[in-house]
Amino acid sequence: MNSGKQYWRSLEERAQSKEFQEWVHREFPVDASIWEDEVSRRQFLKMMGASLALAGLTACQMPQEKIVPYVKQPEEIIPGKPLFFATAMPLSGYAMGLLVWSYEGRPTKIEGNPEHPASLGATDALAQGSVLQLYDPDRAQAVTEAGEISDWPSFFNDLDAAMADQRIKNGAGLRILTGTVTSPTLSRQIEAILRKFPAARWHQYEPVNRDNIRAGSQMAFGEIVEPVYRVDKADVILSLDADFLMEGPGRIRYARDFANRRRVRNGQTAMNRLYAVESTPTNTGAVADHRFSVRADEIEGIVHELSGGSPTRSWVGPVLRDLEAHRGSSLVVPGDQQPPVVHALVHALNHALGNVGHTIIYNQPVEARPTDQTESLRELVNEMRGSKVDLLVILGGNPAYDAPADIPFAEAMTKVNLRIHLGLYQDETSWLCHWHAPETHFLETWSDARAFDGTATIMQPLIAPLYEGKSVHEFLAAMLDQPGRKSHDIVRETWKLDDNRWHAALHDGVVPDTKSRQKNVTLRKFSAPSSPSHSGTEIIFRHDPGTYDGQFANVGWLQEWPKPLTRLTWDNAAWISPVTAHRMGVENGDVVELKYQGRSLEAPVWIVPGQRDDAVTVHLGYGRTKSGRVGTGAGFNAYTLRTADAPWFGGGLEIRKTGKHYPLSTVQHHQNMEGRDLVRVAPIEEFIRNPSFAHNEVDQPSLYPGYAYTDYKWGMSIDLTACIGCGACVVACQAENNIAVVGKEQVAKGRHMHWIRIDRYYEGSLESPDTFFEPVPCMHCENAPCELVCPVGATVHTDDGLNAMIYNRCIGTRYCSNNCPYKVRRFNFLQFSDIKTPSRKLQYNPNVTVRNRGVMEKCTYCIQRIESAKITAELQDRRVHDGEIVPACAQACPTRAIVFGDINDKASEVRQLKAQPHDYGLLVELNTRPRTTYLARIRNPNPEMKT
Amino acid sequence: MAQIFHPSTNTISRVSLFGALFFLAFLAWVVGAVYRSPYVTRQYAPIEQPVPFSHKHHVTDDGIDCRYCHTSVETSSFAGIPPTKTCMNCHSIIWRDAPILQPVRDSYRTGEPIKWERVDFVPEFVFFNHSIHIHKGVGCTTCHGPVGDMPLTWQATSMHMRWCVDCHRQPAEQLRPRSEVFNVNWQPPPNQAEWGEQLMKDYNVKSLIDCYTCHR
């Protein structure tokens, strides 16, 4: 087994057998663990002699390399310099604007597009991880017929024959199944097919769908509109089971707007206030000023209480008074998971609070054809079961895996004569189809997509298709008798822009004047059919933060990315409360049987403080059986319990201990700060009374002489009030710095490699604790303990105060890591970096060394970006401007919680932030003088409510 | 009992003990010398190329500026190896039938790039940037040697870290005016030391010896 396989190795493979596991452990038998063999002195000397001789031989001559220039060099390409292209990532149909780094034609790193309304320059973890998906060697690489490799011409022959049959029947047997479509080009093409085949039907299904939002607006206004929140204008926000900072098409924009209203700076102390009422812990609840834990089915009653009913809960009165005191600048946000009636009632509530037009606006729908997707899928399945479908074309998506358990899509499919799947992977659905056609990744094709506010982006390819993929547009063109037509021409035809405007739209990443028009809606009287409240234990379904609905299951970065609240990697788990765990006598990782509506599922539990005692939360997107070497077999498939009538929560769950145990890998075992005040928090009143409550600068004497730092002096400030714990920084850092993925077992041994981690701490009671997030990169101490103990000078202090880690000097003693009080150093215990997989190599950042086994590594403040900016500045005979260097973590951060800059520059933002009274450092009593400091978290609780 | 060892054994043992020390030191010296020798570094060894391109002819005889081919040397980390198109700018007119240029014409016709042999090599954990050295007044020949006299190009220096750091510690000795950077015949003036000091001030040249300057 070669070392490069580490990364892509599947969990199934690993868990297979004891022998296999042992074999894996024996992979590096010598000094990876313990020297078990008895070796005589003689043998030892022989081996040493041989290795010396071999070392001498290999170092004989410098290797001879080749340089391969272009034949005709494209005008804009300068070898060694990156180019940036604007494009967008569609997720559940909605676009997030991106700027993608490209080195000599290879996209290596994804960043947000500052011009794009859904990004404002930031991204989330999924977008960061999507570049690895592009290079995934497990992607579908060829057209296959019944699993056998075939080619496009044979496929089109088959398709043409089937289409010819349909032409006679006006398409009566033709069904097209897509996900949510906002792409004007895609909808134009599908409409063209429907015109040509009038009896054909177009179905849409997305497991993480917005059916409730559509139905709610239909109920309240009699038409479907897209609610868009103006979080920047809201003084008081009430979230009703809505994780609006982490979910939904506007999440990144909302997070930025939310954080912008909470930055306490230079005596400015006005803050917004967030109440979170939620059924399961979320990031939004963690950053809220007040969090109330209720059952998911109680939300409806709460909205009634807020809308004039008599309050039964003590907190409803004060919340309502607060909302009413801020008429026109308050905002109530209903959760996507809540039933339509809650959405309708909240529309009425926002209307009554005078928020419409101020903090909430209603737009024309962004979707090309808003559809009740669950009904759409049900209809399709009924028709398939009735053998009314001859030709089923599935464009993306994986319905055989993610359809509701009571809509037997996979079974009904078998009644279709010809089933075709266009997709990125050979997944569960492909295996049930006659033909699988490889789809291009979004970085490989021309397309278009619209954002939450309707703004359209023309997506441009960063690289030619790596495999034989065709885009959905090319595929549909072939169905429209235009085979061979290129995506570019098809998209260009949609937009009808002249050359200048076309190039401007590509350059900016947004097409001007494409925002959805605002709609004036009138609230109509609706009788709110009260959805039945259920009894017993509640089951709550959420999409997984890392794998989403399952589509990112094979992305190693996202599997190893610790999920924000549980800090679990590589698995999902059934969340239970500490009380439930105690009652059942189970611990983390103990397997329970979940019985719900006659279906059952075994899942390991994870004890989550703040989870309700009468609720279990499971995450969708795991338990894939046909995903790839990374995703197959990880976690359990919660879709098998999910039904169409209650897609997000339902009652009557039975939970039973099985006595089995399943190992789960977490990166944080310890939740307690042990009284060391790592996270400092105060309500705003206390901050006003004592602004330097958190400040702790201790000027202690040191035996070592200080440094002068006459030139630059780099530093970082992290605002804990702004941090929502989304974890985009972690994956961004991994992408930028060529950080390896180590796999589940190695994570369990504490060998994960992330350079920045987001510690999550709890405080208070187990039932409703306060949750804190704290991003921890290297502190770049001025008195760095690590530097003093390195025997070979592999970690040294630089003139600008960085704590440099020099890989080529490192001999792996790990003394530095041992001496680091912050535990931010990471060691390559094994050959974690994949240096063998050809497609994987393309993603590596050429400006960062790929580390091999036996080398220590850690956050460098993105030294490659610092050096590159310094060189650019020097070439122009100037100093580096403030804001010119943005490390990958700060760049990705949706809330701009991380700021980097030159502390010597009096005007720099980072210096201003470090001068704030609530600036503090971690463990400064050790006299490490960290360069990374924190702004204490300030909360804005309602003075009327004492928590 | 008779003596087992002859008295001379004492001397022999002393000599061999001390000799072993000297021998080990000698061995270390040999290893070091071999490591630094042109045998390992390939210094001074002209490299065979698919087309026997002569810098001597193009630079000295024809007087073509370095930047005509190495276009990105002032803007990028990489100086740039000319695309086949650059060769054909002239060679579609002169020497258009020369047999030794057949690979160039083939490349241009087929679109298959010429695979040149790399001459100057630094390991991949070293991040060298051409543009900043050019801007600070380090001439091409300072590192690449008398390129104008090379019929086939060779590596003129060891490219060892010690060689890099020597200059990074004392840049003044190697600096020249920006106008002379691409002059292959430039010779340092006798008062280079003080002139270099002045250039360091003029060009804001700092002695950068932080590891991060090159290793990332």
Image (spheres, coloured by chain):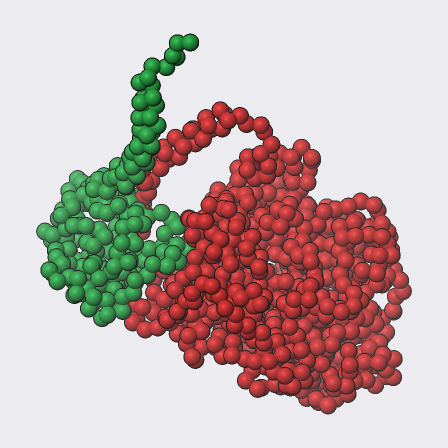
Chain colours: A red, B green
Q: Which sits in the foreground, B176 or A521? A: B176
- Which residue is pictured at 30% across the width and 32% down the height? B22
Above or below: residue A852 compared with residue A548: above
Looking at this view, name the residue that lies furthest to the top: B1
Question: In front here: A824 or A492?
Answer: A824
Where residue A173 sits: x, y (%)?
69, 54
Q: Position of residue A648 (x, y in %)?
A: 77, 63
Q: Residue at x 82, y 68 (%)?
A: A295
Name the outermost residue toward the front: B1
The answer to whether residue A849 is left or right of residue B73 is right
Instruction: Out of A866 and A82, give the one closest to the viewer.
Output: A866
**In the figure, is residue B165 to the left or right of A226?**
left
Number of numbered discs: 0
**Res. A820 visible in picture:** yes
Does the rendering let one see residue A250?
Answer: no
Quarter of the image where the C terminus of chain A is located: bottom right
How far from the left and from the top, in percent, is residue A853? 50, 44
Residue at image x 56%, y 39%? A32
Residue drawn at 54 percent across, 62 percent down: A777
Percent of width and height locating residue A906: 42, 79
Closer-to-camera residue (A452/A219): A452
Q: Is residue A943 above or below residue A841?
A: below
Asked which quadrant contains residue A372, the reply is bottom right
> Residue lying farthest right?
A535
